[in-house]
Image (tube, grey):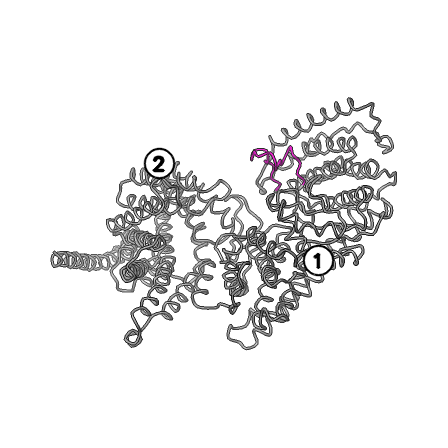
Amino acid sequence: MGLGITYVKLNAGEDTSSDRSTSDGPEEDNDREDKLDQAEQRFAAALRSVHMKESNTDQHWKEAEPLHKLSGVYLKKGMLSKEGDDFTKAAALCHAALARLESSKKEDKYGIKQTLLKIIQSFVFHVLNSEETVDANDIAKHRSMLQEDRDFINEEMKRIEEEIDPYSLDNDDPKIREVEKTRAEANQVLFQRIVQQRSTFISSLVDDCISVMGPPPCKYAMIGLGSQATGLVTPYSDLEFAILIEEETDNNIEYFRNLTHYLHLKVINLGETILPAMGIKSLNDFDSGNVLDNWYYDSVTPRGFSFDGAMPHACKTPLGRGKTCGLIHTPTKMSTVLNDDVEFYLKEGYHLATILGNVCLITGEQDLVDEYSSLWSQKLQQNDGNVSLLKATMEENATKFTEQMLSDKLLNVKKEIYRFSSLAVSSLALVHNMQPTTIWETIEELKTNGIVDSANAHHLMVMVSISAELRLRTYINNHGQVENMSALSSMSTDTDIGETLKVFYYSNQKQVMRYYNTAKPFQDYIAQLDSSQPSKELPILFDNSFKMRARIFKGLCAYKESKDCMILAADEHTLDQAQIANASEDEVMDKAAILVNLIHSLGVAYQDLGDHSNAALNYEISLTLKRKLCAFYGESSEETDKMIATILDSLGMEKINLREYAQAVDNLEQSLQMRLNIHGNTTAHPDIASSYHHLGLAWEKLGDYRMAINYFEQALKMEQTVYSKVTVPPSIASLHDSLGSVYIHIGDHRKAIKYHEQSLQIRLRIYGAITAHPAIARSFVCLGDAWNGLGDLKTAIRYYERALQMRWEIYGENATHPDIANLLNNLGYAWDGLGNHREAIRYFKQSLKMKKSFYGETTAHRGVILALENLGNMWRKLGDDSKANGYFVESMSMRQSLYDETYAKRAASALMKFFKT
């Protein structure tokens, strides 16, 4: 059965000769343009009414009809204007419509394919003034060539992985550096092959165009920019290029503009150009100043080999931004962009000079490229051109030079891993007056010139190799330019928990760690570069210290490994009694300054593992040390106050977990007051919002739900003020969970479910829909609690089991963790509620075993007591009083012991207060 799509009637004869415009004059043309503009607005409005942003919906076919009609409008515009840009937009709209009918029957696509053929033929007829018939099989032929190249690269990557694997070796294996070098060299050869494949493929497309257009009117060179020139291009990368011509006449420029449009049409016909890249103003108006005018999000069209997009900061093609910033020039004119860019383009955020400094030949005459490169090199040496380029690079990519550390969130492999490597190496070359070429050649030249030694050259090669490989792997896995990558584990797909993004889950944690071993120290060096001062000596670009390992393990959610490494890092900076006796007071305090941060981080590691007693202990030690340091140096700074406020906040949270609620409120109120003093009472700041949130948690535990809600709502309002709708931090998800939990307490379970579902959706977007992450598991537990409170125990169990499966994946099948033990208890309660007491006993037994393992076999602890009593109640319900009494006797003994211990603590505290007075 068809989809009921009504295709556009183009009102043009099937014979392309009838498409030639027979305008009756300017007034008639203007009238036709007005009618086409009105038609475009109508069809755009129709598209907007059915537009679906999410990729995991089966409703995208509804967009096919208005997209096809918009294509017809642009075809008519092209016939009238004879502008190649209109025809390329028409083709892109057709392919977008086809993508939304991917699983439909052939007859549903037939009309669109006919329109597409008409667009191509009409372009040749109206723009190129040619009556040559275009081969209808071209599209399939070019797609096949591209796929063959990709298949070859994929097989080569598998071969390299199998034959050269340094990450299977131990870190202290003497062979590891040799194998790392071999892997980097193999990747270099692979990427050189990709560059050559791309050049061959693009050249074949250009040759096809020229065969229809006729020979070029002068010598030319198509030059590759960006990753094509740095030697890091992938089979899915955008095409960034410019054209050098021998003589800049109107006739020559028109020819090469038409050639570029024709090439663009062929690239669009590969079916991998997303619509926002076309800059169709009725869908994506980037220049209007109104965000509502940029509304179309293309989640369906595959994003792969396409022209550099029409978005701001892009447009690195010969066409530029419409009539401006075009890149069809003689070598002499093109080389002046270095000067123009500093004076004009940088203000526009269009950093051409940082791109045009490094080019390669795709097709055409090499001597034009050589002439251009020579002129560019001269310009670079004049008037401190390298300084301007370095400044532009540093300013444009400031965040990339300051945020090189692994996160547990979804990684954008292009922005957060790949781009830093190439930019940082290029920046190092610019500092030393070198003109970057391919990344591999640049590192070799840095070594030859003595700027980096052999060891650092090796580290840079490995870093670049890993970053390029990870990007390539991500694109191949995601079948396009989808940059989502996670170093965490993935779970089986759940189709009902939200949008499922394409994510590359990469399990080789040692390779990810090896990247950061070099990227982090290199980032620290690059970030402090000052082009006006001599560069500092390059440090060893390899940091595998315990502190670095602890930070990376935390980003991998490997909390036990993170804790173990942080303990060793703290031990490295701890002085024993003999060392203290032989050290000056200044030396001791310098060590203490380092220890403060390490011990606080150790507290965080214990907190991640659910060991709240050790977490609180480390926070208290770090707080004492920090205050002693302040007293020793006799001064307090904003940074010092921020650190003390952070420690107090962390300590307050652990006091909540330890049920010391009054102390928690005291710590949290101190932290809040310090943060208000630092940032201002009327300032919206994430730290202040965090304090409000945590105070709300304390008051919730104290049973004052009105106070808790008040704090949570203040925190949420402040977070929403600080962050945009696009950038939603994990803290907002946590706030939704906290509000949901309070509403469970006050009996509004429907409202609780709403908050918890919002929290879950936020976390799925941040971490990935099938990522094994503690925060997602937390959302499942909260939803289970809410449905449990509503009386739907089966739904509650379903959420609890998801959470349990995820926590086993995160912490390990044999792990002991309070959160897992508590979740096992929840499952026991739910099965008890369903009347299945034996299933409840199974979960309560697991919980008891885990809690005794965690707290101690004979240790009196509330959690152990609760598990014992739960088992006693279950056996009593099953009529086995003997087993029930055994559990009750053990629980009573622990209760007495716990009471005695608590009483002794209270008495000691009272005596201390007495002696202080």
Q: Is residue 649 left or right of residue 38?
A: left
**Stretch in magenta:** 278-298
The residue depicted at 14 percent of the width and 56 percent of the height is 913
Residue 659, percent across and down?
26, 52
- Residue type of the residue flagged with mark 2: Asp
Name the one closer to the observer, 505 or 605: 605
Residue 396, percent across and down?
57, 50
**Where does the C terminus fall, quadrant-wise?**
bottom left
Which residue was labeled with disc 2? 748
Q: Are marks 2 and 1 in contact (CB under 8 Å)?
A: no
Residue 488, percent across and down?
50, 57
Magenta-span inclusion, residue 186: no
- Residue type of the residue flagged with mark 1: Asp
Q: Nearer the viewer, mark 2 or mark 1?
A: 1
Measured Cα–Cα span from mark 2 to mark 1: 55 Å
* Main SS category, magenta section: loop
- Rendered image quadrant of residue 326: top right
Regarding mark 1 in the picture, which secondary structure is present there? Answer: helix
Mark 2 / mark 1, whichever is N-terminal: 1
Q: Is residue 364 visible?
A: yes
Q: Is residue 804 left or right of residue 302?
A: left
Q: Residues within 10 Å of mark 1 (few under 14, many from 20)?
A: few
Question: In the image, is residue 795 above or below residue 394?
Answer: above
The residue depicted at 34 percent of the width and 55 percent of the height is 640
Image disc number at residue 151: 1
Question: In the image, is residue 703 above or below residue 901?
Answer: above
